[in-house]
Amino acid sequence: MIGLIGPADSVAHALAVATTHQWEGRIIARPYRHADEAAAVARELDQTCQVLLFTGRVPYELIRGIDLNAELQYISHSGADLYRCIAHILLTHDGRMPTATVDSIDRETAESTFEDLDLPAPACAPLPSDSDGPIPAADELVQFHLDQLASGAAEIALTCLAEVNERLTEKGVPVERIVHTKATLLDALHRAVLADELHRTRSAQPAVAIFRVDVDSRGGLDVYDREQRRLRAQSALLHLARKNGGRLSTLERDLYAITTNRGAIEMALERRRNGHSSLLDVPNFDAPTTVGVGIGDTYSLAEENARSAMRVDGDAVTVMFPDGRTDSGRGAAPAHLGAQDVTDGYVRLGERLSIGALAAQRLVRALGKVDTEAVTARELGEAYGVQTRSARRLLSTLIDAGFAEEIGIRARPQAGRPQTLCRVELRRILEELDQPAPAA
């Protein structure tokens, strides 16, 4: 899913363009009243969305230091947007362009746009690209425009920010809002959609967990005892694979592999950080066991990374990602995955679906990784980290609760059971999470 963050008018404008290209079902819109609310909104949408798209550079800059999982993008105000603004001023000022101030557009773009039209260069508010300082706050931008107009250096203020436009208007200052053109919005939305699709594809990357169980480590065992221990290990691993929607295979004697996908492994890491059992918990085989987990673009690369991960730390299960990064799921959880995020809304959702609050939180995150307009139980199971039959029960529960509906059947290319397609109203679920708790 794509989280769209910005002032109400900018969000509405972007949604209108998205609707013309049938992308609205992939977008969760969260308008704010003030730019300093962007961080709280971003943390909320980070629970579900793979991409966070800001309608301007200022809110994007304000949250860049926050630890978030989602990819961050923003809709830049381009020269085309500024041309449009200037054209509107010329139409309303009998063809005369007043001297101007400009904010939230980089100086080079603003000055070159005015130069192309043979207009005096505007006074530009500084941005991080122009100085080492932080992004100016709304108060600073308002004061910048007021100072320039009061000194006679400018006659009109051009601003990209709804909040600055509103406050200058209240003060009776000549001001014009720089809004995005449809072309600018379309380009930014297309990039966000492509990024969202890439994240969904990445979550389906092959993953392999390799288990080396040294059943011959203890001396004094006869052939029968060793074989019994080996069979118990195989049985435990088979149960672990089925529980997590994976498949068990034997690579060589006492070396086993569970194949699954990146989404299931990332969910397992998150569960381990939060103190819950997961695929990364090694069963008690009463024998020394070494485990490595690898993720790759192919199963061969995933297996190669898993073997490398086995050599990283013999006392912990290590996951090796395609870029060589490793993670064991140990240590403190990131701030955005902490227990404080299990709000009353998740408690109420869990009660409605007859699952726990943490499970409800996991379900909402998993739904953010799939196409909720047409999802199958298999796809939900891969994103959630459970078997297809368990995901089928979750979809049935969502349907019973009024959050989903069956919309058709997807035939499989090979022989096999056709897959039921469901539409899940994720935006409605999120809206209900935001509802205040009922009064006691």
Image (cartoon, helix red, strand yellow):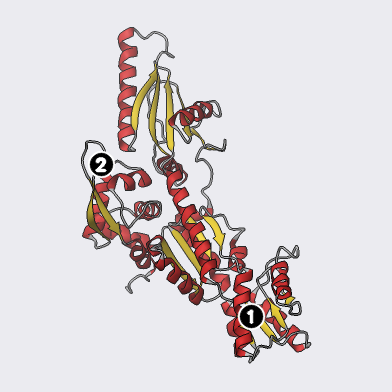
Whole-percent x and y of residue 324? 57, 35
Q: CA distance from mark 2 to mark 1?
A: 55 Å
> In front: 180, or 215?
180
Q: Nearer the viewer, residue 371 or 430?
A: 371
Task: Using residue 169 as the reference point, say whether residue 213 is left or right of it.
Answer: left
Q: Residue at x 27, y 51 (%)?
A: 394
Residue 275 appears in the figure: no
Which residue does the numbered mark 2 point to in the structure image? 412
Residue drawn where x is 33% and y is 74% of the image: 439
Residue 8 shown left or right of residue 434 in the figure: right
* Left or right, residue 342 beside residue 121: left
Q: Nearer the viewer, mark 2 or mark 1?
A: 1
Specify few, some or many for label 1: CA neighbours under 10 Å numbering under 14, 14-19, or 20 or more.
many
Answer left or right for 38 relative to 116: left
Q: Is residue 375 visible?
A: yes
Residue 67 coordinates in the image, percent (x, y): 56, 54
User: What is the number of the mark on residue 86?
Assistant: 1
Marks 2,1: beta carbons within 8 A: no
Marked residue nearer the N-terminal end (2 or 1): 1
Query: Could you tell me which secondary element the residue under label 1 belongs to?
Result: helix
**Residue type marked 2:** Arg
Q: Position of residue 7 (x, y in %)?
A: 52, 74
Quadrant in which the C terminus is drawn:
bottom left
SS state under label 2: loop
Residue 408, x across and y down, in percent:
22, 54
Callout 2 environment at 10 Å: few (<14), some (14 to 19), or many (20+)? few
Quarter-wise, where is residue 397 in the image?
A: bottom left
Quadrant where the N terminus lies? bottom left
The amino acid beneath tag 1 is Ile
